[in-house]
Amino acid sequence: MVDYDVTEGGDVFYILTNDGGAKDFKIVEAPASAPGKENWKEVVPHQQGRLILSHMAFAGHLIWLERFAGLPRIVIRDRNTGEEHAIAFDEEAYALGLQGAKEYEATTIRFSYSSMTTPGQLYDYNMATRERSLLKTREVPSGHNPDDYVTRRIQARAEDGELVPVSLLYRKNTPLDSSAPCLLYGYGAYGTSITASFSTNCLSLVDRGFIYAIAHIRGGKDKGFAWYEDGKMFSKKNTFSDFIAAADALVSENFTAYGNIVAEGGSAGGMLMGAVANMAPEKFSGIIAAVPFVDVLNTMLDDTLPLTPPEWPEWGNPIASEASYDYIASYSPYDNVAEKPYPAILALAGLTDPRVTYWEPAKWVARLRDNTTGTAPILLRTNMDAGHGGASGRFQRLEEIALEYAFALKVSDKAES
């Protein structure tokens, strides 16, 4: 499929497209009077690993938002001189949003910024002078001082040599001698990139001495379209080994220790949790699996479920392909539960979940309880009023988060905090 996104630039069009195998997109210029493909002129070439997300054109500048090496960048090109620059930021990991401007003649654009330490901010940026003006910072009613926290970005080396970005948040006074507990979050599916943005929720753990980490594993587009392709279908196991590599990196750099890491993921990220529980249970003190897609093989074999056929391009069709059957069977969390000591596990289900039916985590927990040789608790909570997104309502959702974090504190011997 060829995608196009067109923006007007006076007498020319700027076209963002993946045409010609440009999986991470390129920008071409075409005359407005004759925009056919034969008249395209490449302006921003395709570069594997640099995913161009959006673009805008103004009288004097062409700008685009891209993701490179797991981080977003806003790049500005002077249309007259061709000179380019990216807006610079001090923190090692952050999230950006590009709002642009309403007027074609504008020289000032607007963008949003946040990081794991910095609440959402809104800036005006002069593309010619490169000066920025802070317009607004999101207020945290309970109070928040960004200077009390640190945002870091490290690289974990995967089994095949790829570097997996890991974003970290911790308080400045947190000891970095491997004694701190860590909550490591991962997803890794459908090309969804997990941004290092601000969230007040995780501060409750961080204020209690935790290091909060996000593993930007394959299956997302954090490092381009190939990063997604290398974490789906017959490459799905890269997602799981990347997550384990992230845990290994946190230990090797003395942020935490094996057996002191709580892993967390939901939905397809819950599949990740089930897989790493089977592959490396000794490395985690606990696992939080929210609406976990853990009965992968049986679900993909049941084409009467309305959501199964649309999922085949992501996981494979085990009905039509023996190779897909064998590969899914080799990692499907439910099918690979074995007699071994599993860490403490909290599985969360929703009775009316149309995506991950409630019986998937129920079956998984039952099999885990039958097979574990350890004494750690394996818990199941089925919300009788919730679907795939968890409890509805602001306070009900906060109650669910509180339950997850209470579990993390308990298995990390910090329940008294």
Image: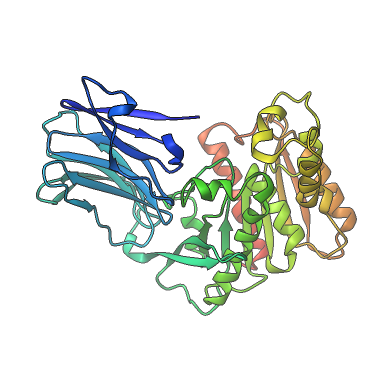
**Colouring chosen for the image of the structure:** rainbow
Q: Can the viewer see residue 64? A: yes
In the rendered view, does 280 fall on the left or right side of 124?
Answer: right
Which residue is most to the top? 33
Q: Quadrant of residue 78?
A: top left
Relative to 316, does residue 385 appear above or below in the rendering? above
Residue at 63% in and 58% down: 263
Residue at 20% in and 51% down: 84
Residue at 49% in and 48% down: 194
Residue situated in front as seen by the camera: 215 or 238: 238
Residue situated in front as seen by the camera: 45 or 233: 45
In the rendered view, does 60 fall on the left or right side of 287?
Answer: left
Relative to 385, does residue 205 appear above or below in the rendering? below
In the rendered view, does 336 fall on the left or right side of 7?
Answer: right
Residue 383: percent from left, percent from top: 70, 36
Q: Quadrant of residue 190?
A: top right
Residue at 12% in and 47% down: 81
Residue situated in front as seen by the camera: 134 or 410: 134
Which residue is most to the right? 370
Residue situated in front as seen by the camera: 392 or 364: 364
Residue 395: percent from left, percent from top: 53, 38
* Quadrant containing the C terminus in the rendered view: bottom right
Q: In which quarter of the image is residue 11?
A: top left
Q: Can the viewer see residue 416? A: no
Residue 160: percent from left, percent from top: 60, 64
In the rendered view, does 125 fall on the left or right side of 214?
Answer: left
Residue 350: percent from left, percent from top: 69, 35
